[in-house]
Image: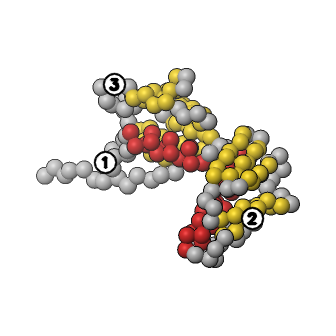
Amino acid sequence: MSRVGKQQLAIPEKTEVNVSGSSVVVKGPNGTLTRDFRPEVTVNVADGIVTVNPLKEDKLSRSLWGTTASHINNMIAGVNKPFEKQLILEGVGFKSEVSGKTLVLALGFSHPVREEIPEGLTVKAEKNVITITGINIEQVGQFAAHIRQLKKPEPYKGKGFRYRDEVIRRKEGKKSV
C-alpha cells in the first residue's frame, strides 16, 4: 500500500481539476498545468477531492500510484503558490544579471555565459542571488540544476553556485612545512 497514493487530495478554492482519459488539467489563480499519466492508474475527482487508485495489484501499478498522487499534489500546489529556488553565486568577480529573456553570467571564463530563460519561469538576479520562480516544480528544479551545473561549488574556497539551504563541506588546503 502506498502511503502517499491512498491519501485524498483536497482541492482548494479557486482551483479546478479536470480529468479526461489519462490527462489531468489543473487550473488555478497562477495558471494552468496539464499532464498525461500512465493508464495503470486511475484519477477520480468528486466533491472537491482527488483520489488516485491502481487498476491492478502488480508492481508497476503500485509504484506509479504514489508517484501520480505526488505529481497531482505538486500541480495543485503550484497553480496556487508558485515554487521558488534560490541560487547563491560566490566568488570574486562572479556576476549575474537578467537582460530580457536571457540570464547573463560572468563565471571567470574568457566569455560571458548566456542562458535562455524557459517559458513559464521568472528569474531575478540581485547581488549574486538568483531567484527562479514558476508554477511547474519540475521546470523550476531542472533550470536551477542546469544553472548550478555551470559552476559547481568547489570545496576549498566555496566558489561557484550553491542552493540557499545547501551547506558546502570545506576542505583544508595544503600545509606548508
**Whole-Å distance between the Cαs marked 3 and 1?**
24 Å
Q: Secondary structure at mark 2?
A: strand
Q: Residue at x 57, y 39 (%)?
A: 132
> Is residue 7 left or right of 150 when viewed as pictured?
right
Q: Quadrant of the N terminus?
A: bottom right
Q: Closer to the N terminus: mark 3 or mark 1?
A: 3
Secondary element type, mark 3:
loop
* Camera-nearest residue between 173 and 110: 110
Percent from the top left, x then y, of residue 90? 41, 38
Q: Is residue 66 visible?
A: no
Q: Using the rendered image of the protein, determine whether residue 49 is visible from the camera's viewpoint.
A: yes
Where is mark 2, residue-wise? 51
Q: Nearer the viewer, mark 3 or mark 1?
A: 3
Residue drawn at x 60%, y 62% as measured from the top left: 67
The alpha-carbon separation of the residues under discs 2 and 1 comes to 49 Å
Q: Residue at 37% of width from left, 40% of height from top?
A: 151
| Disc 1, SS | loop
Q: Which residue is mark 1?
A: 156
Which amino acid, mark 1? Tyr
Residue type pointed to by label 2: Thr
The image position of residue 63, as x and y in percent, is: 57, 69
User: Between disc 2 and disc 3, whose residue precedes?
Assistant: 2
Measured in 3D between alpha carbons, the distance from the residue under mark 2 to the one under mark 3, in whole angstroms, is 51 Å
Foreground pick, 175 / 107: 107
The numbered disc on residue 111 is: 3
Disc 3 marks a residue whose amino acid type is His
Mark 2 or mark 3, which is nearer to you? 2
